[in-house]
Amino acid sequence: MNTFPDVGSQFLQERLGVNAVARVAARLGLIWRENQVKDLGIDGQLEYVTREGNATGRLVAVQVKSGESYFRYEEDDCWRFYPEEKHRLYWERFPIPAILVLCRPITDQLAWIDVRQVLRSLSQPTAVRVPKKSSLEASSREELFATSGVTDEEFAGDLKKVAMLMIAKHAQATGLPLSYFELFVHGLTNTARSLYFGMDLAMEVTEGNLDLENPGRGISIGPQEHEFLFEYVKLLVSQDLATVDFSDCLIDWEDHQLQPHFVAPLTSRGRALVQMIGSTEDRLRSTGLLSSQSPSRVAQERFFQMVFVGTGERIPLVRSFETLINGTPGVLDD
């Protein structure tokens, strides 16, 4: 008869995996917070710490699967992991990126992938492919936090520096004569409390600038211009100007080779930047350095709307579809 409680091999395997993640976090200078309540699909959270040692509040969740059984479905370049349906739904709707770590204790191997990003993609795979090359020990802190919007852009605490940075980020040398500052002020909407971004905005501002500077010149858009526009999205996130769902932007950018488009609420910093631009404009107008004749403001809201194409044909089509669904039992069944 066994007198003492049985620890069980699964408990030991799990501890080896979680402890391995904690060691990597300490080596990278990140904060690791292990969940102290029952594990429901997340073992803990990592918080990004700058190289200067400053905590940032940027988090990723971590789920560790430890044991040889998680490495049995092997391909040349990855291991296939089959999540339970409850975990698929849980990770997909999690409010921050969720990293899945596969731990092989006998070799101290740690492979990882942002499982939330995979499950949010349109492909919805049955298996999550965890790349063999994505070693947790060999990854940088920026790689681990990539889908949360962490970049190597230095955070400018002074809003004056932010404004100057946005003005300096100019694509004059490329086919798009516009700046990040112009994208920002022309994208303000919802009583200047939100920010719109899309390819249509970039094209409209560019065309307006060309009319002023070089009438007749055409717009040239290539990889350099697209990279310039996507870097603007990164700047909004890195400078904490708007609450942008950066992980969703990456799906557009990486999976579909498209510029993202969104309406994002301004953060308190973003709203303070708008106010600073407004007060600076008032001062410049009062001194006569800026024309006071125009009723328009540098930073003011604009309205935007969805452009419907072929609406006349689709309205009766949608109505017929709706009627059939409502009046024909079982029509939605496969």
Image (spheres, rainbow, N blue to C red):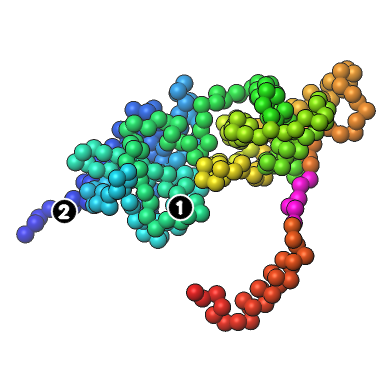
Q: Quadrant of residue 261?
A: top right
Q: Secondary structure at mark 1?
A: helix
Q: Quadrant of residue 214?
A: top right
Q: Residue at x 60, y 30 (%)?
A: 224
**What's under tag 2, amino acid-wise?**
Asp
Residue 10 placement (x, y as % from top left):
22, 51
Disc 2 or disc 1, which is closer to the eye? 1
294 vs 275, left or right, is right
**What's under tag 1, amino acid-wise?**
Leu
277 vs 238, left or right, is right
* Magenta highlight range: 303-308
236 vs 126, left or right, is right
Residue 88 placement (x, y as % from top left):
42, 56
Asked whether residue 217 appears in the rendered view, the answer is: yes
Q: Main secondary structure of the magenta part?
A: loop
Q: Residue at x 34, y 31 (%)?
A: 138
Q: Image height check: is 71 above or below 284?
A: below
- Residue at the disc numbered 2: 6
Along the polypeptide, which appears first: circle 2 or circle 1? Answer: 2
- Residue at the disc numbered 1: 119
Instruction: Give the class, few, some or many, for how many residues have Cα within 10 Å of label 1's Cα (few <14, many ≥20).
Output: some
Residue 146 placement (x, y as % from top left):
48, 36
Task: Locate the N terminus by quadrant.
Answer: bottom left
Instruction: Give the class, few, some or many, for how many residues have Cα within 10 Å of label 2's Cα (few <14, many ≥20).
Output: few
Q: Looking at the image, which is closer to me, 123 or 265? A: 123
Q: Can residue 234 be found in the magenta stretch?
A: no
Q: Can residue 304 be found in the magenta stretch?
A: yes
Q: CA distance from mark 2 to mark 1?
A: 37 Å
